[in-house]
Amino acid sequence: MANKDIVVYEPPQLHHPKMIAAFAGWADVTHAGSAALSHLVRTLKAKEFAYISAEEFYDFPANRPVVTISQGVVQSVKLPSNRFYYVKSAGSHDLVLLLGIEPTLKWQRYTNSLLDFANRLEVDKIYLLGGLYDVVTHTIEAKITGVASQQQLAQTLREHHIETLDYQGPSSIYSLILDTCKERGMEAINL
């Protein structure tokens, strides 16, 4: 089934892929998740193969495109970017990396398009990376917390000494992705 929100220009052949995603925005304080994912893209020499079309998902006055002008001539205009990369592995699974920007519009459609695409690629687990502010002194080690789409994954987080959260309040795209994964029976973890 075609996905009109995602443009694929080099479909990869993947072996048991896992997806790692990060979205610049509200739940990516100090660019903790997006910087980590950018580092993976660079160091693993990931190959770009698809992107999510920006037109439906961004309020451009709130999330302005970036222009490059040289000597009075427009060189390029860059819309908010959501790019997919892949890494072939000699191990048991390949990686799909999504480096994006939290959408400002149509979150449910964005999430469904993303998860439909993950299913099409046969991704069996999604890891989301982000960062939030907390009251922590600089003299102690920063803590890693996690949220999961299923109870057994939350237990796995605790077994790895990752604190699971109790929270009620404003949300990000990460929470909607986790909730939709839960509804679909997909495994997802947000660190």
Image: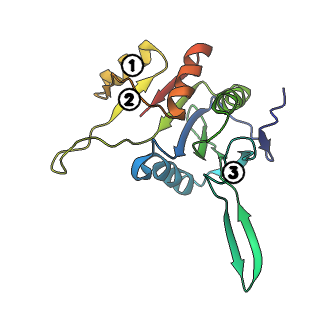
User: Secondary structure under badge 1?
Assistant: helix
Q: What label does residue 146 carry, if any?
A: 2
User: Secondary structure under badge 3?
Assistant: strand
Q: Earlier in the sequence, mark 1 or mark 3?
A: 3
Q: Look at 42% across and 13% down and name the residue there.
A: 151
Q: Amino acid at mark 2?
A: Gly
Which residue matches tag 1? 154
- The CA span between labels 1 and 2 is 8 Å
Left or right of 17? Residue 121 is right
x%, y% of residue 171?
A: 47, 31
Q: Amino acid at mark 3?
A: Glu
Q: Earlier in the sequence, mark 1 or mark 2?
A: 2
Outermost residue toward the front in this view: 61
Which residue matches tag 3? 48
- Which image quarter is the N terminus in? top right
Q: Amino acid at mark 1?
A: Ala
x%, y% of residue 55?
A: 75, 46
- The CA span between labels 1 and 3 is 31 Å
Q: Earlier in the sequence, mark 2 or mark 3?
A: 3
Q: Residues within 10 Å of mark 1 (few under 14, many from 20)?
A: many
Which image quadrant is residue 88 in? Answer: top right
Left or right of 99? Residue 34 is left
User: Secondary structure under badge 2?
Assistant: strand
Proximity of marks 1 and 3: CB atoms separated by less than 8 Å: no
Proximity of marks 1 and 2: CB atoms separated by less than 8 Å: yes
Which image quadrant is residue 104 in? Answer: top right
Q: Look at 35% across and 24% down and name the residue there.
A: 167
Which of 89 and 134 lies nearest the eye of the viewer?
134
- The CA span between labels 2 and 3 is 28 Å
x%, y% of residue 78?
A: 70, 61
Tell me how the rendering is colored.
Answer: rainbow
